[in-house]
Image (cartoon, grey):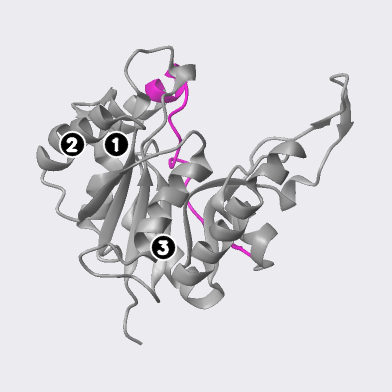
Amino acid sequence: MEKKRCTAIVLAAGRGSRMKSDVAKQYMLLGDKPVIWYALHAIEESAIIDDCILVAGTQAEDLVHVREEIVDRYRFRKVDTIVAGGGERYDSVYQALKVIADGDMAVPNRDGFIFIHDGVRPFLTEEILERCYEAVEKYHACVAGMPVKDTIKLADGEGYAAQTPDRSLLWQIQTPQAFDTKLIISAYEKMMQEKENLMREGISITDDAMTVERFTGQKVKLVEGSYENIKITTPEDLRIAEALIGENS
């Protein structure tokens, strides 16, 4: 079967307040490269991913910075488009999906797959991308993740342990999350129409799989990622990533 076209959406619009730094976490140095370099490099070298939309900050200077200091400097040729992000993660994803839906790319992706990845997950591998491709081809929607190692407690409103879910059924969700192009665009269009209602009801959409599940009814397959596929959110995460870079170099 001929491989379908695969477009990656790489999210790099966050400010990272939990890093306690004036530099956005995606631009902080990991080894001798910015954090965002690692995900873009994995995509650049991948036989699975054909092109990429990079979602940068919300200001014009953010787009100029990422174009000059990241894409041009490191010659990431698969980056087709750089778009500004939004206030929330789902806003940023939607901005990228609009580019795909409108066909505003060098090669349109109307019937392929979309891989959505956090730019602050630097340990993306070809093996993870391959597993996601095999799953999305078969199941139409999938997310990378790993079974949790720790016991998880659900708390009540007063901070007491209320329930202990069966650990064997719990997964820690990662990215990439991969979907049929038409499926993910449809899901996000429906969600954006209901955005105000969701906000009034206090419903938080935290990942793309949740959007697909809620607004299309499509089941999402869990795919093995890696325990090393960490998201850099805090200074502690950056120190762990530095140790992993040292081990892998």
Q: Depth check: 46 or 55 in front? A: 55
Tell me the residue at 39%/23% (across/down).
238
Disc 3: CA contacts within 10 A as few (<14), some (14-19) or many (>=20): many
The boundaries of the magenta stretch are 220-239
Residue 236 belongs to the span the image colors magenta: yes
Q: Nearer the viewer, mark 1 or mark 3?
A: 3
Residue 53: image x %, image y %? 30, 52
Disc 1: CA contacts within 10 A as few (<14), some (14-19) or many (>=20): many
Residue 36 numbered mark, or none:
1
Q: Which of marks 2 and 1 is in front?
A: 2
At label 1, which amino acid type do we have? Ile
Residue 114 numbered mark, or none:
3
Dot 2 and dot 1 residues touching (CB under 8 Å): yes
Residue 16 belongs to the span the image colors magenta: no
Q: Quadrant of the N terminus?
A: bottom left
Q: Which of marks 2 and 3 precedes in the sequence?
A: 2
Residue 111: image x %, image y %? 40, 76
Residue topped by disc 2: 70
Cα separation between marks 3 and 2: 22 Å
